Image (cartoon, rainbow, N blue to C red):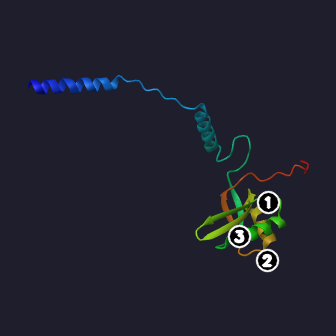
Amino acid sequence: MIAGLLLLFITSSIAQAQTRGKLEIIKDSRIDTLIARRSAIGKNGGKVPGSGISAYGYRVQFFSGANRKDAFNAQNRFQRMHPELRTYISYKEPNFKVKGGDFRTRLEATKLVEELKGMFSPLFIISERINAPKLDINTPTP
C-alpha cells in the first residue's frame, strides 16, 4: 500500500514537471513573407500580385521520342525558326518531349501550330504552368 502511494506521488510529480516547461519558437521572418505571398497568389486566382501574369497557359509540343540527340536537334531547329520563343525539354522515361512558347491563350498556341505544320510532326497544344512571355521592348505601346 505504501509502495502504491509512493508510486502515485512520484508519477504525479513527474507529470507536473512536464507542464512547467517553456517553449520558444525561433523562425526566420522570411517564412511569414512567403506564407503571405502564397496566400495572395491563391486569392488572386493564380496570378502573381502586381504582375498580371497568369499561372497557367499553353505550350506547343513539337517533338516526342526516345533519342536525346534528336530532341536537342529538334529544339535547335525550332529556335532557329522562332528565336523569340523559349523552348523546354523534359524527360519522362522512355521519352524526351520538347515544347515551345509560353502562350496565355489557346489561340496564340494554335497560330504557332499552323506555322509549324509540315516542319514538325506530331504537334500538340499542352496546357500547363507557363513562364512570363518575353516582352519586346522595341515595340511602342499604344
Type of residue at label 1? Leu
10 or 36: nearer the eye?
10
Callout 1: 10 Å neighbours few (<14), some, many (20+)? some
Q: Earlier in the sequence, mark 3 or mark 2?
A: 3
**Which-is-in-front pick, marks 3 and 2?**
3
Q: Which residue is mark 2?
A: 118
Q: Judge whether 134 appears above or below 69 on screen.
A: above
Type of residue at label 3? Ala
Query: Where residue 32 is drawn, which disc sits there?
Result: none
Identify the image quadrant of residue 52: top right
**Residue 26's x, y, as percent?**
52, 29
**Residue 125's x, y, as percent?**
70, 66
* Element class at badge 1: loop
Q: Earlier in the sequence, mark 1 or mark 2?
A: 1
Callout 2: 10 Å neighbours few (<14), some, many (20+)? few
The reply, left or right, for residue 26 in relation to residue 63 is: left
CB atoms of marks 1 and 3 within 8 Å: no
**Residue 128's x, y, as percent?**
65, 58
Q: Judge whether 107 appears above or below 13 on screen.
A: below
Query: Where residue 71 is drawn, which disc sits there?
Result: 3
The reply, left or right, for residue 139 in relation to residue 31 is: right
Identify the image quadrant of residue 92: bottom right
The reply, left or right, for residue 14 in relation to residue 120 is: left
* Residue at 83% in and 64% down: 82
Q: Judge whether 87 appears above or below 119 on screen.
A: above
Q: Which residue is mark 1?
A: 85
Q: Earlier in the sequence, mark 1 or mark 3?
A: 3
**Residue 132's x, y, as percent?**
74, 51
